[in-house]
């Protein structure tokens, strides 16, 4: 009973201690959820960025007879062909519009199955597509890009 005045101050310090421990616990839980939670789906954004890069390349460069040859196209546009062959598909048509997806004729093609473009609404595992039409010197180009690169996920 000699030290009653000091004991109240020590007992009140338990409240800030518990608040700090709760904040730390919630922070750890949020960090674990963010790290091991759902993966990120950047396929649509990647297809759009690739399409934009190709569109810009076509508009800025002079289109010669051999511009759309595989080596020249990748070099002129600054695109890594190994990455495209592994995760993406590109198809460039000459003025076909929406028929470019099903058409056998194309100016440039990397990949083979462009019919999956309409299927990604039914099943999320299909590649994401992006289509864009551009005009240069009175000629219409339809650029279709697909991305199938998924983010890395922890397999449980």
Image: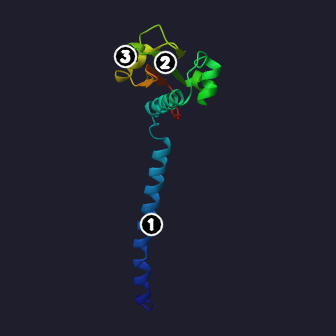
Image point (56%, 25%), residue name: 62
> Which mark sits nearer the N-terminus, 1 or 2?
1
The one of 113 and 38 positioned closer to us in this rendering:
113
Quarter residue 79 falls in: top right
Residue that mark 1 sits on: 20
**What distance separates the C-alpha of mark 3 from that of mark 1?**
59 Å
**What distance separates the C-alpha of mark 1 from that of mark 2?**
58 Å
Quarter residue 33 falls in: top left
Rate crowding at label 2 as few (under 14), some (14 to 19) or many (20 or more) other CA atoms within 10 Å. Answer: many
> Which mark sits nearer the N-terminus, 2 or 3?
2
Image location (x, y in percent) of residue 72: 64, 21
Q: Could you tell me which secondary element the residue under label 3 belongs to?
A: helix
**On screen, residue 112 above or below 145:** above
Q: Residue furthest top?
A: 104
Residue that mark 2 sits on: 92
Circle number at residue 98: 3
> Which mark sits nearer the N-terminus, 3 or 1?
1
The one of 21 and 116 positioned closer to us in this rendering:
116
The one of 64 and 21 positioned closer to us in this rendering:
64
Would residue 85 be found to the left or right of residue 99 on screen?
Answer: right
């Amino acid at each position: 009973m000699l030290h009653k005045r000091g004991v109240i101050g020590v007992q009140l310090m338990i409240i800030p201690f518990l608040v700090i421990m709760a904040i730390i616990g919630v922070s750890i839980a949020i960090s674990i959820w963010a790290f091991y939670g759902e993966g990120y789906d950047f396929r649509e954004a990647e297809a759009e960025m690739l399409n934009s890069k190709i569109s810009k390349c076509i508009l800025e460069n002079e289109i010669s007879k051999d511009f759309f040859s595989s080596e020249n196209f990748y070099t002129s546009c600054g695109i890594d062909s190994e990455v495209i062959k592994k995760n993406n598909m590109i198809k460039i048509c000459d003025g076909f519009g929406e028929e470019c997806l099903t058409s056998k004729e194309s100016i440039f093609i990397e990949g083979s199955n462009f019919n999956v473009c309409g299927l990604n609404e039914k099943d999320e595992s299909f590649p994401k597509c992006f289509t864009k039409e551009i005009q240069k010197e009175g000629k219409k180009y339809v650029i279709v890009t697909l991305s199938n690169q998924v983010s890395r996920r922890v397999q449980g």
